[in-house]
């Protein structure tokens, strides 16, 4: 059983040093839990090891992450558009940071990518 797909996570992909999960904005887990579970899966191969990691809040404000993407979930438009209609296809909003030695990227559609920095050519 793929632990990253439990509790409404949906999509999960794991490569050698990369884990991709889909955060369920309407699910019972907050974004910080999804991040910790993905990082634990990248680190140990078991998302249930998330409780052994430091809190996500030690590197980034979890409430700020939730609030950053709330407008896009509520309006169906990018959170960074200032509430103004946009023409054409704007790139999706995303946030990147380092957590427990891994590069974490979160996009407004809820995709969380956790990668070992040694596997990346550039951030």
Image: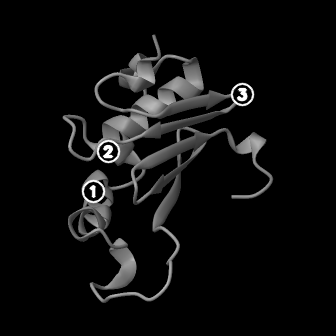
**Which quadrant of the figure contains the N terminus?**
top left
Q: Give the mark nearest the N terminus, 2 or 3.
A: 3
Q: Are marks 3 and 1 in contact (CB under 8 Å)?
A: no
10 Å neighbourhood of mark 3: few (<14), some, or many (≥20)?
Answer: few
Image point 24% across, 63% down: which residue?
70
Q: Considering the numbered disc 1 on the image, is that residue within a helix, a strand or a loop?
A: helix
Find residue 16 and name its label: 3
10 Å neighbourhood of mark 2: few (<14), some, or many (≥20)?
Answer: many
Give the labeled residue for mark 2: 31
Q: Is residue 108 above or below residue 103?
A: below
Give the labeled residue for mark 1: 66
Q: Is residue 76 left or right of residue 45?
A: left
Of 106 and 57, nearer the camera is 106
Image point 42% across, 40% down: which residue?
22
In the rendered image, residue 116, in percent from the top left (x then y), is placed at 67, 38
Q: CA distance from mark 3 to mark 1?
A: 29 Å
**Which quadrant of the figure contains the C terminus?**
bottom right
In the rendered image, residue 53, in percent from the top left (x then y), is placed at 43, 28
Q: Are marks 1 and 2 in contact (CB under 8 Å)?
A: yes
Q: Is residue 60 above or below residue 49?
A: below
Image point 30% across, 30% down: which residue?
8
Q: Give the mark nearest the N terminus, 1 or 2.
A: 2
């Amino acid at each position: 059983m793929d632990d990253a797909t439990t509790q409404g996570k949906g999509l999960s992909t794991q490569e050698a040093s990369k884990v991709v999960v889909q955060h369920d904005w309407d699910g019972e887990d907050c974004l910080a839990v999804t991040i910790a579970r993905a990082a634990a899966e990248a680190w140990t191969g078991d998302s249930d090891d998330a409780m052994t990691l430091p809190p996500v809040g030690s590197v980034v404000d979890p409430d700020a992450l939730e609030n950053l993407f709330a407008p896009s979930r509520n309006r169906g438009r990018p959170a960074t558009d200032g509430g103004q209609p946009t023409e054409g296809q704007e790139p999706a909003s995303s946030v990147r940071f380092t957590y427990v030695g891994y590069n974490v990227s979160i996009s407004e559609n809820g995709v969380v990518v956790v990668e070992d920095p040694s596997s990346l050519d550039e951030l």
